[in-house]
Image (spheres, grey):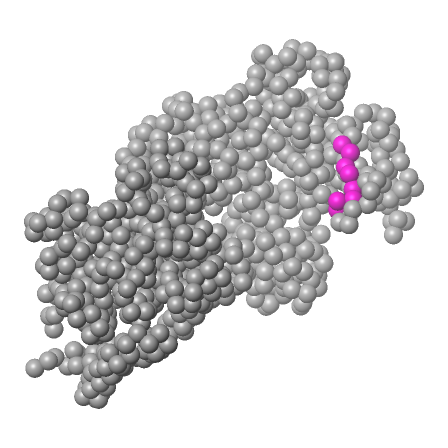
Amino acid sequence: MMPHWLLALSPVLGIIAMAMSATHALPIFVAHIYDDGQEPRFVISMLLNFGAGAFLWLATRRYKRELALREGALLVVIVWTAGALFASVPLLLSLPELSFTDAYFEAVSGLTATGASVLSEIDRLPPSINVWRAELQWLGGMGVIVLVVAILPMLGVGGRQVSKAEIPGPMKEESLTPRITQTAKGLWFIYAALTVACMVGYHLAGMDWLDAVIHGFTTISLGGLSSHDASLGQFDSPAIELVAIVFMLLGALNFATHFLAWYRRSLSVYARDPEAYWFAAVMTLSIAGISLLLWWKGPFDDFWTALRYGAFYVVSIGTTTGYANADYELWPVFVPLWVLFLGTFLSCSGSTGGGIKMLRAIILYKQVYRELKRLVHPNAAIPLKVGQHVVSNHVVFAVLAFFFIWTAVMVSATLLLAATGSDAVNAFSVIVGCLNNIGAGLPGIDIEPLTDFQTWVCTFVMLLGRLELFVMLVVFTPAFWRK
Amino acid sequence: MRIVILGAGQVGSTVAESLVTEANDITVVDLNFDRLKNLQDRLDLRTIRGNAAHPAVLESAGARDADMILAVTQSDETNLVACKLAATMFNIPTKMARIRSADYLSHPEIFSPQNFAVDFPICPEQVLTDYIDKLLEFPEALQVLEFAAGRVSLVAVRAFQGGPLVGHPVSHLRTHMPQIDARVAAIFRGDSPILPEGDTIIEAGDEVFFIAAAENIRNVLHELRRMDKPVKRVMIGGGGNIGRRLAKQIEHRYDAKLIEFNKAHAERIAAELDRTLVLAGDVTDEELLENENVGDMDVYCALTNDDENNIMSSLLAKRMGARKVIALINRSSYVNLVQAGQIDIAISPAQATIGTLLARVRRGDCVAVHSLRRGAAEALELVAHGDRKSSKVVGHRIEELDLPKGATIGAIVRRRERAGRGLDAQASFDYDVIMAHHDVVIEPEDHVIVFVVNKRIVSKVEKLFQVSIGFF
């Protein structure tokens, strides 16, 4: 017999499933316009979604009540795993040669805004399928924002817990509304507005509307999925690349900071956000350095071309998006290694990016500095400050634990892939790409040759990375299931 | 004058003491019975026990016919309320409040007559902090006092063998530095004052007081002693009100370290400060001072609340090699014990801060009063009002003034309208600093800086500057 507290989750899941059926409207519309034959399949998937949701809701409605903390954690895990299950249905229906493993991987890669793909010849996929894959990334990005802003703080773990007490102005000040639902609405509004702006930007820069919509979805969510095998390189347009860079940068900043800037009609909010400061500093230095390196050692003869490709690459991988616009295999090997390293920490907390987040990186760096200073001055009281706010030791320990788990997951998953047949570089590259939701690893290395088992490992790692490790792992602890 | 003083803490009792000797009727209000009893036993004044922000208490303290109220309790809020009551219920003409929070001070509009009705907000902690800050800027000086909003300074310095002017008459200052106008106001040799004439010889060990425009201080100091390297490293002992303020004020200009005894308090201070290294420990802990290289410090400031700790700690720091040590010492008997010995500068917080208060209490139009040499001497900034008929000063040459013996005029600050009128009233004036040579004629509204070697003659000087009745 299922415990009651699990039953209480079902009606919520039912509602979410029914809401998700509504998201099928867009691919159905696209299928109808382009007449690509996928319309009935999306309708089937939609009905399935709606039916399952309605059944769950109706059957367990009477158990509905306020959710407790641990139910929240479980809810998040179920939403992401079961959501991916439903999301893979249209893929399975329209691409019969796709195995369930691969379809599920593809759906998780979408919902976690990772952008890795097992599919090839993407150009020849039906437009509605590409829209669906892009929309999944967009929904995933939106989910992450709610997760970080609304759910993690209730659980008392993860990124927002850090941000709640210690971060920039945004989270602390009265102007982010007192209620979570209102806050979530405000953030979604920013998210949607940026998406629309991005789509319009792409269209003005020369994309047709279909491509603009697809890439708009995957730019703001930092997913990096494209409807072309050559990714953004397909267009070979500096204007399109510029639009991409601008919106990738915006997507990698804390959405609470965007919200506050919009609310106050003031750009000074960004200047006061220490995360944004470090983000901008590391980004600028990296772009300058990489461009100079590409000009000096690399394939480009003039600086401006080097800057165009260098800036795009640094922003694309650094923000965990994963678009490509050139053949990176020809570049000095330092460049991809450096940007992959950036991708592990550069995105700000409360953004749609992956990795350990800038805030945690700042705290880790300052903690190291603090320990060193303590060796010289054993009596000193050295507070760890981010911006003007003091970070409590409790949070520092949580960040250290997070970093430890992150490293442990990366090492063990890499070893697991190596043990099951991948070579070392390959395994490392794929796992870094998945754990940090970048999608792309080192150039020239693909997901495709993975075995089924390895694909499941990657799927799990993507979910771990997206759900900020703790939320996913807490569900696997015995204490979680104890009464 | 009838004056009501609210609060009998350090500030309140020092002010009371100082004002009683100047023939005022003082009533002191405080909650603490022992403090009041102590005051009552020593001084000729009245004490009332009660909450200073309650109308009934103010009433019984004689607020109805008081000329002035000084709200100097520990609590900003009590002081504000008391001033408001003094204005609304008792119509006391002059109201001063001690305001410590920078938050209040940054909104001057709340002190207006419609609001809290504070005529002069004062912050003794800030005055003391500025005082120490000045000493860090001029590490050779014993005391640096500012007049006319910082345009003129009076500097006390001990003359040392090696200064170009030492061993020479005062008049050589002019020949050494023809382009710089400075004036030696007084010299203390041992404990006795010498009013310098042109041929007075400056000896090594003399405490020389000179007046100069702010930008010339360094040049004049150079004449009197070998100059030290500018201050780079500062260590502050004690993270109390003063220590914390000082650290915050100087941390971007100097390398600052601060020692605070209470660990929790140390952590709070560290959170508040940006660059200061905050250490948790005892200021008299030799090992801690050793580990933190007190010997390499340019200045060590002992600023705890405890006199003995400050003395011990600064002696220790000096022995371990700190270049210059400053100690905050409340008890005047201690100050006399340690000054000019191992401790370079002993600051009496009460004497350093009381000037701003006294300036408002004095008759005549007195802008600033500074105590010198632990209160034995005073420097006053007075405004000359009226015209040749109504005033004994205006329109007269300095040599004609009937100054009592022991008083000298150091400098005059004269406001002059600027050629092009600015929009801002303040900005449309320039200020001239005029050194007081015998033939300078004093004009109306001049700020006159008077140096008084003996406090007993202060009232005579003030009388001199009062305008006779006919003026009004």
| Residue B429 falls within the magenta-colored stretch | yes
- Assign the magenta stretch its main secondary structure: strand
Say which of A273 and A321 sits in front: A321
Instruction: Judge left or right: residue B399 versus residue A460.
Output: right
Residue A177 at x, y percent in the picture:
43, 70
Instruction: Judge left or right: residue B78 versus residue A158.
Output: right
- The residue located at (77%, 27%) in the rendering is B435
| Residue A190 falls within the magenta-colored stretch | no
Query: Up-down: is A1 above or below A460?
Result: below
Residue B452 at x, y percent in the picture:
71, 32
- The residue located at (74%, 29%) in the rendering is B410
Say which of B397 and B374 sits in front: B397
Instruction: Judge left or right: residue B158 versus residue B404.
Output: left
Q: Is residue B361 visible?
A: yes
Residue B159 at x, y percent in the picture:
60, 18
The magenta segment: B426-433
Q: Is residue A63 visible?
A: no
Residue A209 at x, y percent in the picture:
42, 67
Say which of B7 and B2 sits in front: B7
Among the 4 quarters of the image, the one containing residue A127: bottom left
Among the 4 quarters of the image, the one containing residue A301: top left
- The residue located at (83%, 25%) in the rendering is B438
- The residue located at (27%, 35%) in the rendering is A375
Query: Up-down: is B13 above or below B155?
Result: below
